[in-house]
Image (cartoon, grey):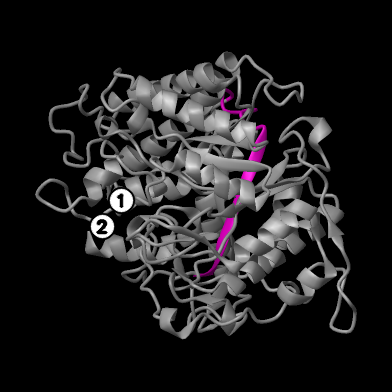
Amino acid sequence: MKRLIKIAAAVLALGLVAPVALASGETDAAAKPRTVSFSSIGSLAAPSGKGSFRFGVSSSATQIEDQNTDTDWYKWSQPAPEGLGKSPFVGEGVKGYSKAIEDIGLLEDLNVDSYRFSIEWARIEPRRNQINEAALDHYSKQLDALIARGIRPMIVVHHFANPVWVDNPEDPGCTKGPSDTNLCGLDHPVGGPLVVKEMAEHAKLLAERFGDRVDEWATLNEPMVYMLFSHAFGAGPPGKANLATNFSSKFVPALRQYINAHAAMYRAIKRYDRHDADRDGLNSTIGLTASVKQYVAVRDGKVSTEPRDTAARDRFRRFFELNILDSLWKGDFDTNFDGTADEPHPDWKGTLDWLGIQLYDRTGVSDPGDTPGPGTLPVINVDTCGTAPCLPASDPSYFIPAMGYESDPGGLYPVLKDFGARYRGLPLVVSESGIATNSGKRRAEFTVRALEQIQRVRAEGVDVRGYYHWSLMDNFEWLQGYGARFGLYEVDRTTMKRTPTEAAKVYSAVAEARTLTPQIRKLYGGSGPLSPEPADAATTATPVPAATGRRH
């Protein structure tokens, strides 16, 4: 298990960003930055939405909400003897449930068009087939308050957390077989289909109750990241480490069922969301969000052009990103990750109306050859790393001490360009982008540069329809606890007071004007170094497997 956790830390804490010489393609060192304008919000998937743009922010229920004791993450992280005590305790979050209506004022102050957030399944259905009407009423009032302020909701159906009865982390072996208190999870031959059915029933309930106000849905958040921490390495609930030892019998069946769950939720929402709330001609637009990376072939601390390393780079990308997305795009499945689909799934094809892109960090990949080391990723046989000396630094200021990786918003340009070409006709949205920092100016720079890159790729014809900043406020960062701060609003966890950072003020000004002015671009945009991390926050984190794509 310790070896698997070490591998998980190496794999899940990685991503890649390539620096660019010019931040927007519109300026250089001698020229004054030009004004960059953004159009108004439109449909996320309809043809009428091409050319539209939305400013948004993201959060997730498990990461912010209080009174949330029925999730597997609460059981997993709660100190023993009441819980398992296997990671930092989520506790009462940042009081995001109690303050849900109050926090909409923060969104209003940001001038955003849209709010992407999840509805906690474990709160809605804490016991199998027992629906909490008070919780549904709470989320209904939250939706009403958003719409009253002109903020369009996007609901994420599954963002990493489950009710305990789906796959109880106290009994990952499911010794008594599937029951109402433990369905045994996605990897179980009997329980797996039951979990898929329950996820579809949950999506149906949300569509029935909220479809009159919600048209934009994400079925899954970063599905491969979820599979890695939950079923590959056992780093998070339910704690199953099956990649190395039970790849064909456990890991692949779990992944197959999770893709089945996406397709089942897609069909349920399409059937039961009968209202065109945003009047774009579609009752629902449904996608998922993918943790993506740029991958650098490396060897001996340098970028490698050796065929064995470039092949390893491509294997890792296929494993981490493309297998799931290609399965949904083409309607087939590569069960052994060798690059050739060997299992037809026509019912999966056509279940993506849009795709969310979430890029955070930078990954070096090499081929260990016939002598894999203790950190080698099994099955696909690659070594990965996220920092020097293994991976050459693109700029020292892009290193994120709180996370132990490197991040550069310039990477959005090549990533979006690639996905636009790979999945032609599929609208894209940057559904998360952000930086862990205690510096508001550093976050503002990262945000403005990300928007410059998005507009640059849009100007070249790539259909990118918006940007959601991660995150609205500081929150629980999964296995990293509360140490890393991603919020536009800083949260004092003693008083739970929300305080706008410099980045919140800059993003608000940009969203209100729908413009990156020359002044803002000069202060915060362009290329080159970011402002330094404050000295009192510069302690470097040990990369650990966390549970949203920004951290792996």
Please name the residue that numbered disc 2 is placed on.
87
Residue type (three-letter) at the residue carrying disc 1: Gly
Q: Quadrant of residue 163?
A: top left
Residue at x 20%, y 22% (from the top left corner): 179
* Mark identifier at residue 236: 1
> With 369 as the anchor, is 286 left or right in this view?
right
The residue at 70%/44% (across/down) is 428
Amino acid type for the residue under numbered disc 2: Ser
Q: Residue 289: x and y, percent?
A: 56, 44
Would residue 340 be visible to someone looking at this image?
Answer: no
Mark 1 residue element: loop
Please tell me which residue is depicted at 22% across the width and 44% down the height of the picture: 75
Q: CA distance from mark 2 to mark 1?
A: 8 Å
Name the outermost residue toward the left.
Answer: 81
Q: SS at mark 2?
A: loop
Relative placement, left or right, of 168 versus 457 is left
Location of residue 166 with respect to 355 vertically, above or below: above
Q: Main secondary structure of the magenta part?
A: strand
In the image, is residue 306 above or below residue 274? below
Q: Is residue 391 above or below residue 60?
A: below
Along the viewing direction, whichever of 441 and 234 lies nearer the viewer? 441
Assess whether mark 1 and mark 2 are in contact (beta carbons under 8 angstroms): yes
What are the residue bounds of the magenta stretch? 346-365
Q: Nearer the viewer, mark 2 or mark 1?
A: 2
Q: Which quadrant of the rendered structure holds the N terminus?
A: bottom left
Q: Position of residue 85 (x, y in %)?
A: 18, 54
> What residue is rendered at 49% in x and 81% in y?
534
Residue 232 falls left or right of residue 456: left
Q: Earlier in the sequence, mark 2 or mark 1?
A: 2
